Image (cartoon, grey):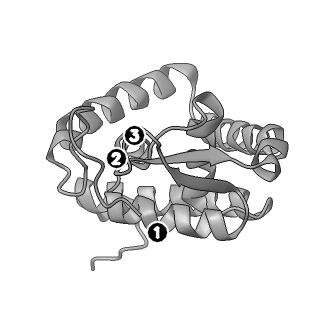
Amino acid sequence: MFDERNPEQLALGHLLAQVCRLAAGRVRTHMETIGLHRGQGFVLMHLWHNDGMSQREIACAMQISPATMTNMLQRMEQAGWVVRERTASDQRIVSVRLTDKAKALQAEVKEKFCEIEAEFASIYTEEERATLQRLLVKLHNRFAPLNPHRPPCSTDDDEPGGT
């Protein structure tokens, strides 16, 4: 009898989808302890490295749709994590800047990401982790260009979804 709770019985794609969902739940749990939603920590990490990125650049880096990015940034703006403003040189481009509230959270968010990495790393030997990373990168490189929600990431394109 087929039992979805038995991962050894699942097709590879189904198992990968379940593992992704479970891993996302672990990330969400860690981020919620500091008042962030799962994806918001990733946005903050990008901005700590390059404050003032455009919405399009963040969406490209995270490989999510412009509409999803707009919704996420609206929530983050309402929560006081970021400020969005149109650039003076091109009103179509929306620049995203960190607030003092977000800057103050940097060490805590980095610590949470380190906890998540340690939790995942504790499951594998070093050799298994290297193999898993190599296989996941191979999957990523195969599927990322096919993502229908991935915005075109050329810097010559107009800013999508703007607001």
For mark 2, give the secondary structure: loop
Dot placed on the residue nearer the N-terminal end, 3 or 2: 3
Query: Which residue is tagged 2?
Result: 63
How far apart are the two marked residues, 1 and 2, measured between alpha carbons? 15 Å
Query: Which residue is tagged 1?
Result: 71
Percent x, y for residue 33? 79, 62
Percent x, y for residue 134? 35, 25
Dot placed on the residue nearer the N-terminal end, 1 or 2: 2
Q: Say left or right for 42 vs 61.
A: right
> Which image quadrant for residue 152?
top left
Camera-side residue of 158 and 21: 158
The furthest residue to the front: 88
Tell me if residue 24 can be seen: yes
Camera-side residue of 16 and 80: 80
For mark 1, give the secondary structure: helix
Percent x, y for residue 142? 18, 36
Which is more foreground, mark 1 or mark 2? Answer: 1
For mark 3, give the secondary structure: helix
Quarter containing the C terminus: bottom left
Which residue is rendered at x = 47% and y = 42% of the image?
88
Relative to 152, say whether 148 is above or below.
below
Which residue is rendered at x = 66% and y = 34% of the image?
48
Query: Which residue is tagged 3?
Result: 57
Which is more foreground, mark 3 or mark 2? Answer: 3
